[in-house]
Image (cartoon, rainbow, N blue to C red):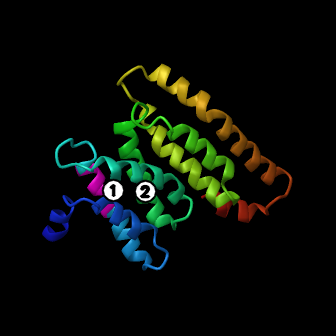
Amino acid sequence: SEQLFSCEQRPGFGAALLQLVQSETVDLGIRQAGSIYMKNYLKRRWGNEQGGVPPNERDLIKESLLPLVLRVPRPVRTQLFACLEEIAAADFPSDWPQLLPELSRLVAVAEGPLQQAAALDAAHAVLGRFRGSGSGDPVREARSCAEAYGPAHLQAWKSACERALCGGLPPDQLVAHWE
């Protein structure tokens, strides 16, 4: 544990964790453990100026996390949502202006209900800061988010309703996909 903790300070550690988590050839239990470690690593180091996550790794992690949540199994995805939440709380909107456009794009290109649900859950994790937040101007920030992300969310909702009402999927399968 101490060896792993000391490795956190080396350049490339965050990128290596990301690579472990996304590798489909690695056992799911190891990927899940890696995603848990990544969540805790980001909580400890993301906000630190000295000894934190290096800028090039910060960019790599931000660019990789959103597309990754669509491809990983649920146990890993759950931890990645916590990673997104941590980063968004620190960097959004000023240091991550492309977040909402990327979330909207992911909802639009999601292939099937499972990926669409993952994209919507990612948005839920990122935008959760507006629930009970007393910082900044929450009305202005929430309005900006609704304007940028709202159309994609509305389209996802319409698509889900259409599948449910027009028989695109049997009810038991629809429930399984959206749980």
Q: Is residue 52 above or below residue 100?
A: below
Residue matched to label 2: 80
- Indicate the amino acid at tag 1: Lys
Circle nearer the N terminus (2, 1): 1
| Label 2: few (<14), some (14–19) or many (≥20) C-alpha neighbours in 10 Å | many
Residue 150 screen position, x and y as percent: 63, 33
Residue 82 visible somewhere in the drawing: no
Q: Is residue 46 above or below residue 71?
A: above
Which quarter shows the C terminus? bottom right
Residue 137 screen position, x and y as percent: 41, 19
Q: Is residue 51 above or below residue 27?
A: above
Q: Is residue 121 left or right of residue 78?
A: right
In which quadrant of the rendered view does residue 172 lie?
bottom right
The residue under the point 61% across, 42% down is 104
Residue 26 visible somewhere in the drawing: yes
> Secondary structure of the magenta portion, mostly?
helix
Q: Is residue 71 highlighted in magenta? A: no
What secondary structure is found at the residue carrying circle 2?
Answer: helix
Residue matched to label 1: 39
Q: Is residue 42 highlighted in magenta? A: yes
Q: Is residue 101 left or right of residue 75?
A: right
Residue 166 screen position, x and y as percent: 86, 53
Q: CA distance from mark 2 to mark 1?
A: 7 Å
The residue under the point 34% across, 69% down is 33
Q: Tell me which segment is drawn in magenta.
A: 37-44
The residue under the point 67% across, 52% down is 109
- Indicate the amino acid at tag 2: Leu
Q: Are marks 2 and 1 in contact (CB under 8 Å)?
A: yes
| Label 1: few (<14), some (14–19) or many (≥20) C-alpha neighbours in 10 Å | many
Which quarter shows the N terminus? bottom left
